[in-house]
């Protein structure tokens, strides 16, 4: 994985691709693995959002906060650009434009 990252090969974040520590109920763990490889947090978040939407063929409707896109928003306590662990401190979730209890 480190070699792929160093080559700049396209990668998306997920929990079922044989990535070390990537388990279905531990998505943040898999994101932290990419940080361990030296990938900047901003790129890791892109891998989990815009890059994943592009890979799935839905980039014209999801993967970013933009008018007309599906509104899936996660509000956390902290700044995941500085510390991915902040993604464990979920305070608010909005999916398909509707709030969900945390």
Image: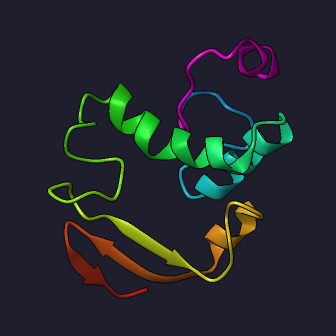
Q: Is residue 39 left or right of residue 19?
A: right
Name the quarter where the C terminus is drawn.
bottom left
Residue at x 67%, y 64% (from the top left corner)? 80
Which secondary structure class fits the magenta region best?
loop
Give the percent coordinates (x, y) of residue 33. Answer: 77, 42
Can I make out residue 12 in this image?
yes
Q: Is residue 12 left or right of residue 85?
A: left
Q: Quadrant of residue 43?
A: top right
| Relative height, residue 92 to residue 45 (above, below) | below
| Relative height, residue 99 to residue 15 (above, below) | below
Residue bounds of the magenta highlight: 1-16
Q: Nearer the viewer, residue 102 or 64?
A: 64
Can I make out residue 14 in this image?
no
Q: Is residue 60 left or right of residue 36?
A: left
Q: Nearer the viewer, residue 58 or 65?
A: 65
Q: Nearer the viewer, residue 102 or 39?
A: 39
């Amino acid at each position: 994985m480190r070699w792929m990252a160093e080559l700049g090969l396209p990668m998306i974040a997920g929990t079922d691709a044989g990535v070390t520590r990537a388990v279905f109920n531990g998505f943040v763990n898999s994101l932290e693995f990419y940080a361990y490889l030296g990938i900047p947090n901003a790129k890791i978040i892109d891998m989990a959002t815009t890059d994943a939407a592009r890979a799935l063929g839905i980039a014209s409707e999801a993967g970013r906060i933009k008018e007309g896109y599906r509104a899936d928003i996660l509000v956390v306590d902290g700044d995941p650009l500085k510390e991915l662990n902040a993604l464990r401190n979920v305070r608010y979730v909005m999916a398909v434009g509707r709030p969900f209890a945390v």
